Amino acid sequence: MLNAAIVGLGWWGKTLVNSVQGKSDLIRFTAAHTRTRSKVEDFCRSNGITFQEDVQAILRDPAIHAVVYAAQHTDRSDQVRQAAAAGKHVFVEKPFALDLKACDAALDAVKKAGVVLAVGYNRRFPPAVADLRARIKDGRLGTIVGATGEANAPGGLALAKDFWRADPVQAPAGPLTGLGVHVLDTFVDYFGPVDEVYCIGTRRAAPHIDDSLSVQMTMKSGLPASFFCSLATAVSYRIAVFGTNGYGEVLRPNFDTFQFVPAGGMPTQGQFKPAEPELVVTKDFDSVRAELEAFAIAIRDKQPYVISHDEIRQVTAAFQAIVESTATRKPVKVR
């Protein structure tokens, strides 16, 4: 059993704990730290978690094997380096870093320390996402001609002005940081690195943050791809990949259903008729538990996490380019 500590016990930190505590045979949380102790004392007590007054006490504790960070984004590189220096395996919430300089420093630290690094892109794990990946990789979709995605939630409508998620330094390009980066990571997973981006971001309804973003991308393979993300509309997540044999998609609003629609034959009477789709439905899959258990398995089996360091860097490079393009409204090459 992997003993982990969590740093940052806001709503998402609690979601991470609740996904595995008392449910998993692979990982459990034994310690925690957050800025305001009074807000989490009852939660820690009910989950058998020891609250630590500072992170250094966690890093010094030999009984803690790994640290999970769900705190502010701008602190991420320092958090990873400190954990690696202490010999702790480290799991960090997305995005891994806001720029390549911070990304490279953190990656170098974990490589030198020889610890396992994981990033919380939990939307890689649902069976529908894996099914679409498999059909891309094994050629069942044929030649891929394009891809599109979306990631939406109404959270921006209620963000307080002084909350860190409303700070453009912590959340550059608005919905990209919390939502759209999932689609970006999936496209890197499916198709490899991004070559160029062109983006338009705007504030349509949220009071304190740019809430809507449209991203056009060209992958290094030449494949065109695009996605939309918003913090001001209903919950929705969708990935669609179009190939010469048909298209596959993870259906909105969540990850329960994979659909494949074959391309079909030639038109009859001048019209193309859609073919009967194939549907694969998987209910009640916990992608947060899946990512944490994959982290624990990587540590147990002394192997890299399923998201490679190269992919982490590729996503960060594209993320940085999207932020720049959103600010300049010009195409930006990914470094």
Image (tube, rainbow, N blue to C red):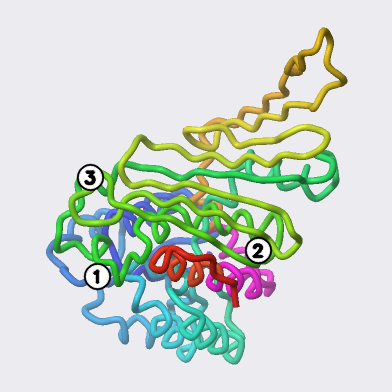
Q: What residue appears at the point 67 percent right and 29 percent down from the top-left corner? A: 259
Q: Amino acid at mark 3?
A: Leu
Above or below residue 285? Residue 292 is below
Q: Amino acid at mark 2?
A: Val
The kind of secondary structure the magenta stretch mainly shows is: helix
- Measured from the top left, where is residue 119 in percent x and y? 52, 66
Q: Which mark is residue 34?
A: 1
Above or below residue 264? Residue 308 is below
Per the image, is 126 magenta?
no
Residues at discs 2 and 3 in contact (Cβ within 8 Å): no
Question: From which residue to which does the magenta span run?
Answer: 292-317
Q: For the residue labelled by badge 3, is the local secondary structure a helix, a strand or a loop?
A: helix
Quarter of the image for residue 25 reads bottom right
Residue that carries the numbered disc 2 in the rendered image: 306
As measured in the structure, the alpha-carbon distance from the residue carrying label 2 to the one carrying label 3 is: 34 Å
Q: Is residue 4 left or right of residue 123?
A: left
Residue at far top of view: 269
